[in-house]
Amino acid sequence: LSRVEQVFDAASFDAADAKLLDIKKSEPAMRVQRRYRDANDRLILIAVSLHPPGRFAYSMVLSRNHR
């Protein structure tokens, strides 16, 4: 594994997924799409996850290197 590409966006649940997660079909979702690549840039795995409200958090810290 050499690289992971991530995309976060808004989506909605279809009826089957909503039923599995015990939520309403109209609930919004956070969709996370990840593409995993090897050292030769070959795609080795794609993962798509849907998260209901209140069940996902993403935190990131960006800092500047002061010299």
Image: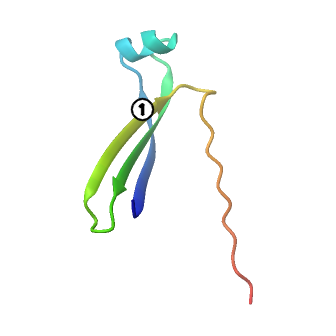
Query: Which is nearer the eye, 28 or 54?
Result: 54
Left or right: residue 12 versus residue 37 is right
Please state the horizontal and vertical placement of residue 37, each as a whole percent of the image.
Answer: 33, 58
Tell me the crowding category of disc 1: few under 14, some 14 to 19, or many 20 or more residues within 10 angstroms, Cα based: some
Q: Residue 14 lies in what quarter of the image? A: top left
Q: In this view, does 61 lie above or below 57?
A: below
Residue occupying the point 28% across, 65% down: 41
Left or right: residue 42 versus residue 16 is left
Q: How many labels does the image show?
A: 1
Q: How are the residues colored? A: rainbow
Please state the horizontal and vertical placement of residue 16, each as a whole percent of the image.
Answer: 36, 12
Residue occupying the point 49% across, 15% down: 21
Q: Looking at the picture, which amino acid does disc 1 mark?
A: Ala
Residue occupying the point 37% across, 12% down: 15
Please state the horizontal and vertical placement of residue 4, each as a whole percent of the image.
Answer: 42, 57
Determine the residue located farthest toward the right in the rendered image. 66
Please state the horizontal and vertical placement of residue 56, each as a whole percent of the image.
Answer: 59, 34
Name the residue that disc number 1 marks.
Answer: 11
Q: In which quarter of the image is the N terminus?
A: bottom left
Is label 1 in a helix, a strand or a loop? strand
Determine the residue located farthest toward the bottom in the rendered image. 67
- Residue 25 visible, this orientation: no
Query: Which is nearer the eye, 1 or 57?
Result: 1
Q: In this view, does 25 lie above or below 53?
A: above
Q: Residue 2 lies in what quarter of the image? A: bottom left
- Residue 56 visible, this orientation: yes
Residue occupying the point 74% across, 90% down: 67
